Image (cartoon, helix red, strand yellow):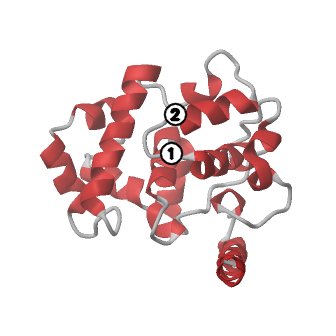
Amino acid sequence: MTPKICIAQDPEADALLERSPLALLLGMLLDQQIQMEIAFRGPYKLFGRLGGKLDVHEIADYDPDAFVALATTPPAIHRYGGSMGKRVQVLCQYIVENYGGETEAIWTRDAPDGAEVLKRLKALPGFGEQKAKIFLALLGKQRGVAPAGWRAAAGDYGLKGSRRSVADVVDAASLGEVRDFKKAAKLAAKSSG
């Protein structure tokens, strides 16, 4: 049984992340330069502003200026709402063009192994190596998406019992543990560099 999503630390936003692969992917896209729970609330803000739906085709086809206005309306989806709104739309356009609008096809089409899912995630606009590995770990640990070799492909983010990323956040306590890990890692990087 997969755990209930508890990343946004908000029941309604977390319920959307749980039922919508697109919302989960967009939350991961937004997870940079802001607290992770705020990033993962971003899709829920869009959901409300789009009339209670989060449709990849609608976002892809939306007038770009109007979509940025949706993303920046207070409270904005991100500290950098304008640029992140554009990234959300570009990601949705990519999903429509490459996966027929089926977000889950990224990790399910043709029964890929973990290395292939990682490759597909890294090809997404706005996803680099680290973000792709974290999202692969999130899929494996919290969504039951466990293609062969997913833990190895996710690297340290795939380790059982770790507390290093959003993939490991299952409640308020684990959120604090992940924050502590990140702080310690930043301190270690500063002192060694």
Instruction: Indicate whether 155 appears above or below 153.
Output: below
Identify residue for label 1.
127
Secondary structure type for disc 1: loop
Asked if the residues shown at circle 1 and circle 2 are in contact, with their CB atoms under 8 angstroms apart, the answer is yes
Q: CA distance from mark 1 to mark 2?
A: 7 Å
- Dot 1 surroundings within 10 Å: few (below 14), some, or many (20 or more)? some
Q: Residue visible at 61% across and 19% down? A: 109
**Place of residue 101 in the rendered image (x, y in percent of width and height, measured from the top left):** 41, 25
Q: Which mark is residue 123?
A: 2
**Place of residue 138 in the rendered image (x, y in percent of width and height, measured from the top left):** 67, 49
Instruction: Indicate whether 45 appears above or below 98.
Output: below
Apparent side of residue 78 relative to residue 49 in the rendered image (left or right):
right
Residue at the top extreme?
Answer: 110
Q: Quadrant of residue 74?
A: bottom left
Residue nearest the observer in this picture, 91 or 61: 91
Amino acid type indicated by mark 1 = Phe
